[in-house]
Amino acid sequence: MRADRLLSLLLLLQNRGRMTAPELAAELEVSVRTVYRDVEALGASGVPVLADRGPAGGYRLADGYRTRLTGLTDAQAGSLFLAGAPGPARELGLGAELAAAQLKLQAALPAALAERARTIQDRFHLDAPAWFRDADPVPHLARIAQAVWDQRVLHTHYRRWGGEVHRALHPLGLVLKGGIWYLVARAVDSVRTYRVSRFLAVDTAADAFERPAGFELAAYWGESTRRLDAVLHQQTADLRLSPRGQRLLPMRFGAAGVRALEAAGPADAEGWVRIRLPVESEAVAVGDLLRLGADAEVLGPSELRSALAGTVAALAARYR
């Protein structure tokens, strides 16, 4: 572990130039005292680490010194697919591996390309979780991820809508969707999707399993989301939308709202348009459509219009 840390310290100085002991300690997640000892160890091994005094001081490498000791470990190489998502990498237990891999890649790049990589990192950031929602607690994610990688059977205790179940699962892959982690796994003879935050307990078995022949995670997920969309959106609502309602619709209904607006008819004299919007069950649709307020009018079906009118009348009576 110390050898890895010394290499990381060396690469930090090589990639970023002068750094203070507290800055190095924060990057390496160690104490300042440990940084002092590691710098002494690098110097004793022949690495020309210079210490500059004063307010603008810190540690730096002697001009012209560069190391090419940048070989990636298996874990570090495997973490690179998460290079744009440090948060998910930490949740998977790969945060330190990702940081070390990035340092090694920067050290191996020519100076011009390394500077460009740092500029991109400074100016572009991926934040996976959705707005206005706390991230799911996923205490078992790292263990599940290891089982996915090792193809080990998982004995799980899972909380679903109808109660709690115990199942043996063959974990096939993990998906991060809108800040929420999902496990795709085979149970008995069917492949299903499980929300990782609902696992109450997970134990990894010693026995391995064989992945289904021809299974592709991306293809399964795409087909699964299409099936879910078809199940959820079994009705279509006819709406009139004000100009403000047209701006709100994509924020409230996502891609379905965007597609509905693209197919909208011409606007009337006041800027209102008519659209056909896929919606869920009547009870869910009433709540969703109320979020558009007075900027939407339901024209049909008549049952949905009546249900919405009844809800609005009840609200009016309550706040009279």
Image: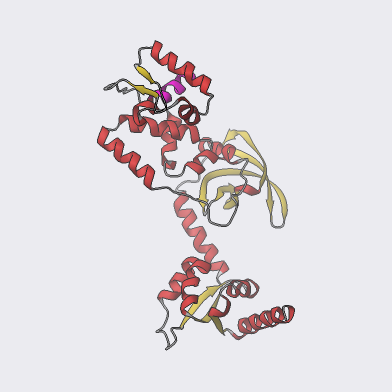
Count every numbered label the image shows and give the total.
Answer: 0
In the rendered image, the vertical position of residue 260 relative to residue 59, given as above or below = below
* Chosen colour scheme: secondary structure
Does any portion of residue 314 appear in the rendered image?
yes
Q: Is residue 209 visible?
A: no
Q: Is residue 252 above or below residue 306?
A: above
In the foreground, 217 or 124: 124
Residue at image coords 47%, 31%? 27
Front-most of 236 and 13? 13
Give the image location of residue 298, x and y in percent. 56, 82
**Residue 1 percent coordinates (x, y):** 50, 21
Q: Looking at the image, which residue is at 57% across and 80% down?
A: 294
> Per the image, is 1 magenta?
no
Give the image location of residue 132, x and y in percent: 57, 57
Residue that lies at the very extreme toward the bottom in this rendered image: 269
Quarter containing the C terminus: bottom right
Q: Position of residue 182 (x, y in %)?
A: 56, 50
* Residue 143: quadrant of the picture: top right
Please, is residue 243 above or below residue 207 in the view?
A: below
- The secondary structure that most of the magenta stretch takes on is helix
- Specify the quadrant of the image occupied by residue 104: top left
Q: Which residues are magenta?
A: 2-10
Residue farthest top in this picture: 44
Left or right for 285, reference 29: right
Asked whether 218 or 105 is in front, the reply is 105
In front here: 293 or 174?
293
